[in-house]
Image (tube, rainbow, N blue to C red):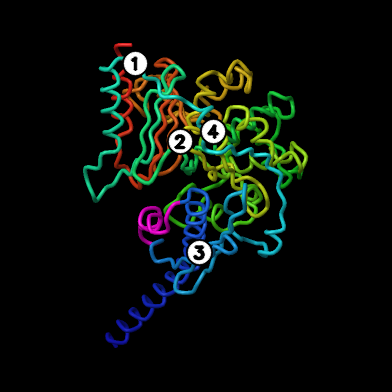
Amino acid sequence: MRKKSIKRIVVSLFIVITIGGIYYLWNALPIITGYTAKNLCSCYFLSHRSIESVKKQELGFFPVSFATLRINNKDSSVTSSVVGFAKKKAIFRSGAGCTLINGIDEATLRKQVFSFNNHHFSDSMSLQKDFVLDSSFPVSLSKKLSEAIQNSFTETNPEKPIRTRAVIILYDGKLVGEQYAPGFNQHTKLMGWSMTKSITGALIGLLVDAGKLNVDEPAPVPEWKDSNDKRRLIKLRHLLQQTSGLQFNEDYGSSSEATNMLFNQNDMAHYAASMPLKDKPGEIFYYSSGNTNLLSRIIRQSLTEEQYHAFPYTHLFNRIGMHSVVMEPDASGNFVGSSYMYATARDWAKFGLLYYNKGLWNNERILSEKWVEESVASGPSQTKFQYGYQFWLNSGMPADPAQRRYADAPSDMFYATGVEGQKIFIIPSKKLVVVRLALTQGNHFDENNFLKDVIDAFKSE
């Protein structure tokens, strides 16, 4: 009798484990194949990286390393699967970058026509109008700064690589430091991940400045139009400040709302809009890529269809010389405003410089000073990780500014940030814009110490 009981328990455990394993794979495999197809597609066709380097670095960790990847140069696509299952395909389109085929047939996706007006200059033209390294600084300062930059590239533990790929230092608007890792240079388009959120915030700002949007009005989301839908209480300001109250799990290490949205949905904004209300809008801070993709679609709804895809280029990028930029849309045609933008390190630095100059570029007003000030004013977040309008702040705890994310950086610093080490630090009081682009998979790089070393290099100035 006892043997039969043990046997039943073993069989039951086996069934439970099997069902759990199937459930995990059912949810996880499409995320794995979507992630690998999309990333290899962009790195290969946009950044012109070698297949081997992408597989070893971006896609070399468990479990994505199990994906089988095939590049088709004839139709500019990448296909991914895991032992033949959960096949996903991403296609590259000139000007639009890479898009995963989700919820739409490939022929229909390829028929989409976009007018980006993204005037990509030749490398020589772009660099002639670009930053010129300032050689007028004292030798002692240059040496300290060079050491700080070099240290950010130095690998000390092969088990925990920091993989810094580019560093740009601007002082008082001038390029005073620049370095790249082997295989990367001034022309390499690099992924910003969630730094793209700050770009989306700026695009919203352009529309607010033009009177097309109002941050204190309900967010114009069609899915919430029912008068009984409590999500109608969500204002545009709440989406900007990440206080929408929508239920959303921003976890990149598992099958979550964030990963399902980015790698398994054709219309990411519609998916985000379908989330139920968890908290009262405006009260609880919760960082969500879903909020930002709703903002991206709101931009589209505020313009004509012909204007939308050209808008970031005609109203922002082209005006400040960000000629390398590619913003990638999802299968519905909405820019993935939370995550998918590629640009050179210098162009990411130009965006930081625009905010450093409070919205001015070469004496031309791009963003209102009011918008920039509101963007870097803290919302309802009550932790040392303060947040404005799609920018992180270093202002610290409301009652104790000393309790802040970067203890050795000033409290007026604000920054755009993306997973794996993408950063644009803007430090007005120190006249600095610091850009670091990387593939740091884990907390292996001391950003606070890096900032301290850079700031210390200018103490004699």
Report the quarter where the N terminus lies: bottom left
Expressed as whole percent of the image width and height from the top left, the position of residue 332 reads 68, 53
Report the quarter where the C terminus lies: top left
Q: CA distance from mark 1 to mark 3?
A: 47 Å
Indicate the amino acid at tag 1.
Phe
| Mark nearer the N terminus (4 vs 3) | 3
Expressed as whole percent of the image width and height from the top left, the position of residue 155 reads 25, 42
Q: CA distance from mark 2 to mark 4?
A: 13 Å
Whether 53 is among the magenta residues is yes
Mark sitting on residue 71: 3
Task: In the rendered view, tell whether residue 60 sits above or below residue 322.
Answer: below
Whether 132 is among the magenta residues is no
State the residue at coordinates (49%, 33%). Answer: 348
Mark 2: few, some, or many residues within 10 Å (few <14, many ≥20)? many
- Name the residue carrying label 4: 126
Q: Is residue 332 left or right of residue 405?
A: right
In the image, which residues are magenta?
Answer: 49-63
Q: Quadrant of residue 138?
A: top left
| Mark nearer the N terminus (2 vs 4) | 4
The answer to whether the residue labelled 1 contacts the one labelled 3, judged by CB atoms less than 8 Å apart, is: no
The residue lying toward the viewer, choosing from 428 and 348, is 348
Q: Secondary structure at mark 1?
A: loop
Mark sitting on residue 137: 1
The answer to whether the residue labelled 1 contacts the one labelled 4, judged by CB atoms less than 8 Å apart, is: no
Q: Secondary structure at mark 2?
A: helix
Discs 1/2, front: 1
By secondary structure, the bulk of the magenta-drawn segment is best described as loop
The answer to whether the residue labelled 2 contacts the one labelled 3, judged by CB atoms less than 8 Å apart, is: no
